[in-house]
Image: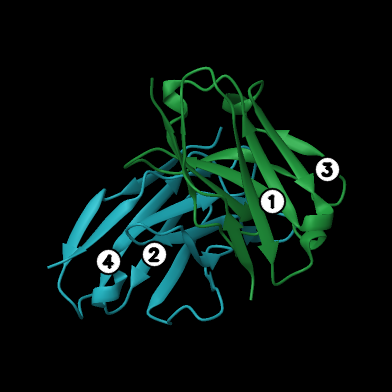
Chain colours: A cyan, B green
Amino acid sequence: DIVMTQTPSSQAVSAGEKVTMSCKSSQSLLYSENKKNYLAWYQQKPGQSPKLLISWASTRESGVPDRFIGSGSGTDFTLTISSVQAEDLAVYYCEQYYDTPLTFGSGTKLEIK
Amino acid sequence: QIQLVQSGPEVKKPGESVKISCKASGYTFTQAGMQWLKQAQGKSLKWMGWINTNTGKTTYAADFTGRFVFSLETSASTAYLQITNLKNEDMATYFCARDDGTGWGQGTLVTVSS
């Protein structure tokens, strides 16, 4: 199975600050035939189901604010929130869909100071 | 808009069975597969597998073989997850989700307690 490692496990920031979180996979998620990285980012707010923010490592879903930025390739990926808002309080998960079983990281909990 | 509505919370005893439903609307049911995921309290998500809504073919992750069954009622745009011989470690919230991740159910909490 592909192991997904997320750091940090939690992070506290003030509104308006920039935050970055990391996700590393145990093998490359870059498929050579189409040059796509099979990596998604989800946001799960307290008491809610996960919401897909970003697919293909950097493609924002429709309606997702442009302060959410996905980057990276191969085995190293980053989710950046350029200016954190109070409503961004959530746990953020990365997920690989390069191979089954699909696997998730342990999450980064974002707290607002 | 895409909507997945799951059945309500369940309280079961060890050894019993549970069947969770997931009704889809806002899209053609057979145009996307359905995956099932488990989330224990305070833990990350675990992919259980998925069902092809066109063919009914199922794929189960290694930890979810034997006691777990995915099924469909295509005429009702509904997918099901059945868990038999419930164990304490099955206590969790179970989510259905489109295979592209763009739509998720609200989750069904299964409590297993003697």
- At x 76%, y 37%, the residue is B58
Q: Which residue is mark 1?
A: B34
Q: Is residue B33 visible in the rendered structure shown here? A: no
Residue A89's tag is: 4
Chain letter of disc 4? Answer: A
Q: Which quadrant of the structure image shows residue B81?
A: top right
- For mark 1, give the secondary structure: strand
Q: Which residue is mark 2?
A: A79
Same chain assignment for discs 1 and 2: no
Q: Which quadrant of the structure image shows residue B32?
A: bottom right
Of circles 2 and 3, the one toward us is 3
Is A29 on the left or on the right of A92, as rendered?
Answer: right
Is A57 on the left or on the right of A88, as rendered?
Answer: right
User: Between marks 4 and 1, how big is the CA–CA gap?
Assistant: 28 Å
Of circles 1 and 2, the one toward us is 1
Same chain assignment for discs 4 and 3: no
* Three-letter amino acid code of the residue under disc 2: Leu
- How many callouts does the rendering have? 4
Same chain assignment for discs 4 and 2: yes
User: Between marks 1 and 3, how big is the CA–CA gap?
Assistant: 10 Å
Q: Residues within 10 Å of mark 2 (few under 14, many from 20)?
A: many
- For mark 2, give the secondary structure: strand
Above or below, B11 against A102 in this view is: above
Q: Which residue is mark 3?
A: B56
Chain letter of disc 3? Answer: B
Q: Residues within 10 Å of mark 4 (few under 14, many from 20)?
A: some
Do labels 4 and 3 touch, CB within 8 Å? no
Of labels 1 and 3, earlier in sequence is: 1
Of labels 4 and 2, earlier in sequence is: 2
Image quadrant holding the C terminus of chain B, namely top left
- At x 71%, y 37%, the residue is B70
